[in-house]
Image (cartoon, helix red, strand yellow):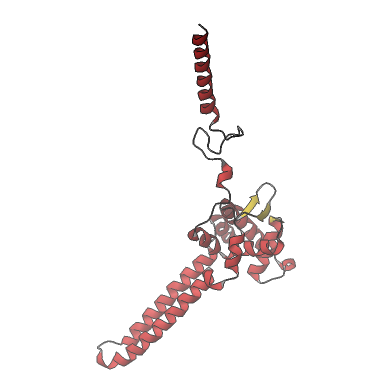
Amino acid sequence: MEAKENSRVKEVDNRDERTDTATNGETGGDGVPSEVSVSGVPDPQTELGRELGLDQVFEILKNQRRRYVLQYLRERREPVSLSDLSEQIAAWENGKEVRTITSSERKRVYVGLYQCHLPKMDGMDVVEFNKPRAIIEPGENIEMFYSYLDTPDTTPDGQFSKYYLGLSVVMLVSLVLAALLESTMAFPAIGLVAGVAVLAFATTAWVHHTSETDSSPAEALLSAGE
């Protein structure tokens, strides 16, 4: 009888243990639940500080306004207000002193940062953007961007400089070859090469301009209404 009773108690204990594990998830040696819950959803903390891919890095760096945010935070090294950040970026964009910018210039930057750029940067842990308080501070991934700011060839402007230089060399060689072949061809080769050169430079310049502006719909609407 006693052996049978002990067996029944042990079976109940095992069943309770399995129930606790299914309810609370796996536990560590100290009884603290592990990072993975029963639902399979990882703890949000495990998502913080993730490494960014090169495409994500250049997604941030390709826009001048986001590079200004990085520059301003590097200079301050402390939490800053969205108002102060907007005023400084507006001054940089318009080549003015902060005290001379207009309210519309400041507002345009403020809206763009608030609705587009800062949420994108916050989503990649580049900055921490407290929307209710309008406070921005460096995020866990911001340090990796500072080296890019100091290296012209790795920034979008540096890349476009290479494109322009490469186009210039190719067009120069093409013009020389066209001049040498001009007498043997039935159509004006130099004119054709010149036309291709103009088209190539125009296309590259348009792409460069697009990457510089890269404004959000809110920014575009605000600019159109002023």
**225 relative to 173, above or below:** above
Q: Residue at x 33, y 83 (%)?
A: 192
Name, please, the residue furthest toward the top. 1
Is 193 displayed left or right of 64 in the figure? left
Q: In this view, does 41 lie above or below 206?
A: above
Residue in view at x 69 percent, y 65 percent:
75
Residue 39 in view (yes/no): yes
Q: Is residue 176 above or below residue 20?
A: below
Residue visible at 36% across and 89% down in the picture: 176
Q: In which quarter of the image is residue 100?
A: bottom right
Query: Looking at the image, how many numbered discs can be counted on the residues?
Result: 0
Q: Quadrant of the C terminus?
A: bottom right
Residue 84: where, in percent of width, then height?
Answer: 71, 59
Q: Is residue 226 visible?
A: no
- Residues 69 and 108: in front is 69
**Residue 212, horizontal then vertical, whole percent:** 54, 67
Judging depth in this view, the residue of 150 and 177 nearest the camera is: 150
Query: Residue reaching furthest right?
Result: 99
**208 relative position to 128: left or right:** left
| Front residue of this view, candidates 178 and 54 | 54
Residue 171 x, y percent position in the rendering: 39, 83
Q: Position of residue 110 (x, y in %)?
A: 65, 57
